[in-house]
């Protein structure tokens, strides 16, 4: 019984090293997994100077079939400082491809060589929630972000209607209330209003004068028209536009 317990204590560290879980990024082909190569006979002596071409690697991801790596790239980390410790480059797309709608999947690798005991590695392939290599600043539960696109269009000023009109309207240094100075050619609102007036047969010569001045005769003379026109400020013009709009049938 004591002998069995001693053997178990000696083997547990090896099992832990062989089956340690590592994480890979979905879609990557330049990340590594690491393993320890031990002698195939005594199961504890670390093997050094193994030739990369002598390795065979199989993998299975998300329950898929065992697939052999075409040309496994294996390298010893350091014979002097980390003997028997090797890296495997995960450079085949099929090893990190996630199915649509999946954010992670388990993958198992089997690494064999004539001189070592077979190594089994368990890995997890994950899909980043933000762009890999980037960070998101969060303070007190609020995320800090810079808007660079609207509906896929850059707002840095690219000569597009969306980008330049957004910049023109929200430029604090040189504010422009309307985006007409950017691009209002072919605007559909004015033709639509004209079509509505025609369709509803609004008597613009009578009804609009009444809306503007309170009666049809108030704008009968040029002098009266000049007096009323000169008396409107910006706010009044906005109100006037609104009156015309809401009174359309």
Image: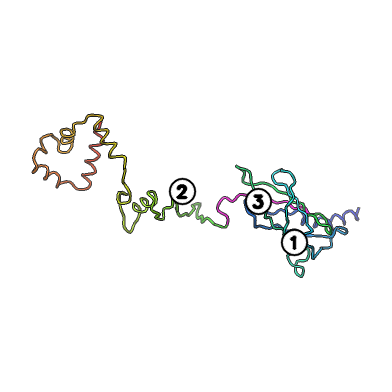
N-term-proximal mark, 1 vs 2: 1
Q: Is residue 49 left or right of residue 239?
A: right
Image point 64% across, 46% down: which residue?
98
- Per the image, the residue denoted by label 1 is 86
| Circle 2 crowding by C-alpha within 10 Å: few under 14, some 14–19, many from 20 | few
Does the magenta-highlighted stretch encompass residue 73? Answer: no
- Per the image, the residue denoted by label 3 is 93
Between marks 1 and 3 in the image, the one whose residue lies nearer the viewer: 3
The location of residue 155, given as percent across then percent down, is: 41, 53
N-term-proximal mark, 3 vs 2: 3
- Per the image, the residue denoted by label 2 is 152
Q: CA distance from mark 1 to mark 3?
A: 21 Å
The magenta span reads 119-132
Q: Is residue 221 left or right of residue 155?
A: left
Quarter the C terminus occupies = top left
Between marks 3 and 2 in the image, the one whose residue lies nearer the viewer: 3
- Mark 3 touching mark 2, by CB under 8 A? no
Farthest-out residue, bottom: 80
């Amino acid at each position: 019984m004591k002998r069995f317990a001693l053997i178990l204590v000696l083997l547990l560290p090896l099992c832990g090293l062989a089956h340690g879980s590592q994480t890979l990024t979905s879609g990557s082909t330049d990340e590594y997994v690491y393993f320890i190569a031990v002698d195939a006979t005594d199961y504890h002596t670390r093997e050094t100077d193994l030739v990369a071409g002598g390795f065979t690697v199989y993998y299975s991801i998300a329950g898929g079939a065992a697939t052999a790596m075409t040309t496994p790239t294996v390298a010893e980390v350091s014979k002097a400082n980390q003997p028997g410790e090797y890296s495997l480059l995960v450079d085949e797309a099929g090893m990190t491809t996630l199915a649509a709608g999946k954010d992670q999947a388990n993958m198992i690798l089997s690494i064999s060589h004539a001189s070592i005991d077979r190594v089994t590695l368990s890995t997890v392939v994950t899909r980043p929630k933000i762009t890999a290599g980037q960070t998101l600043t969060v303070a007190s539960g609020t995320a800090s972000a810079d808007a660079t696109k609207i509906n896929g269009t850059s707002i840095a000023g690219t000569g597009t209607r969306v980008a330049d009109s957004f910049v023109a309207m929200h430029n604090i240094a040189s504010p422009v209330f309307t985006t007409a100075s950017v691009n209002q050619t072919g605007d559909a609102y004015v033709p639509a209003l004209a079509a509505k007036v025609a369709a509803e047969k609004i008597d613009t010569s009578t009804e609009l004068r009444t809306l503007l001045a309170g009666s049809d005769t108030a704008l009968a003379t040029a002098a009266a028209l000049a007096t009323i026109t000169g008396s409107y400020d910006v706010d009044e013009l906005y109100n006037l536009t609104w009156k015309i709009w809401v009174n359309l049938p």
